[in-house]
Amino acid sequence: MYDIIIVGAGPSGASAALFSAKAGKKVLVLDNDKGVTKRAWVENHYGVMEVAGPDLVETGKKQAVKFGAEIVNATVEAIEKTDAGLSIQADGQSYEAKHIILATGFMADLAEKAGVKTKPGTEPRVKTIVDVDAFGKSNVEGIWAAGTTAGVSVHTIITAGDGARVAVNVLSEINGERYVDHDMLKA
């Protein structure tokens, strides 16, 4: 049983995985390697002069793995409620978690199949988004959403920040107190 499973390893998913794994949680990322960032050239990401989208995605994954996140290349077919939490079926395998963060970019069909409420998107080319509250929670207990699929702008800096924000909210709920991650310069 994982503490958190994240569906998607683009900027929002990898950022959520980084924060969650660094907090000591057991984290699994399921990714089908079809994200839109893989086709991007980025020159508007704070702290980065310019970067190819595939390189940004790979760096994000490496950061998450550095802190213990597991990443599996798989396509998620279904999410179901169980007595213990939530179950995900992906490429013939089953995974269980207490919390799932959907970071599926332009795609909300998985959320809809799981009974998660959606609504029309507001970004260009984003037809449907997950209907979440201010913390990133959906109407289904334990299912959260971050990034473009949760209605934030498609820009990588914004989706990455939203992934971190939702992860902090999940971690705060798990820990029973507000989670903060702030490192100090090493001497």
Image (cartoon, rainbow, N blue to C red):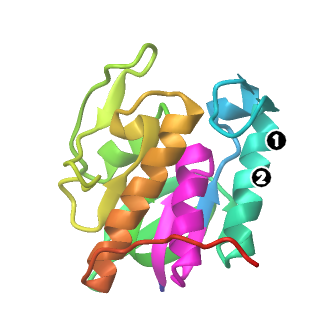
Residue shown at 39%/65% (left/top)? 168
Q: Could you classify mark 2 by the number of other residues whose Cα lies within 10 Å: few (under 14), some (14-19), or many (20 or more)?
A: some
**Label placed on residue 102:** none
Q: Nearer the viewer, residue 60 or 45?
A: 45
Place residue 78 in its image quadrant: bottom left
| Amino acid type, mark 2 | Thr
Q: Nearer the viewer, residue 69 or 88?
A: 69
Residue shown at 71%/24% (left/top)? 43
Q: Position of residue 18 (x, y in %)?
A: 60, 65
The boundaries of the magenta stretch are 2-28
Apparent side of residue 156 relative to residue 47 in the rendered image (left or right): left
Residue shown at 77%/52% (left/top)? 59
Q: Nearer the viewer, residue 168 or 142?
A: 168
Q: Position of residue 100 (x, y in %)?
A: 40, 64
Place residue 52 in its image quadrant: top right
Q: Secondary structure at mark 2?
A: helix
Q: According to the image, label 1 marks what residue?
A: 55
Q: According to the image, label 2 marks what residue?
A: 59
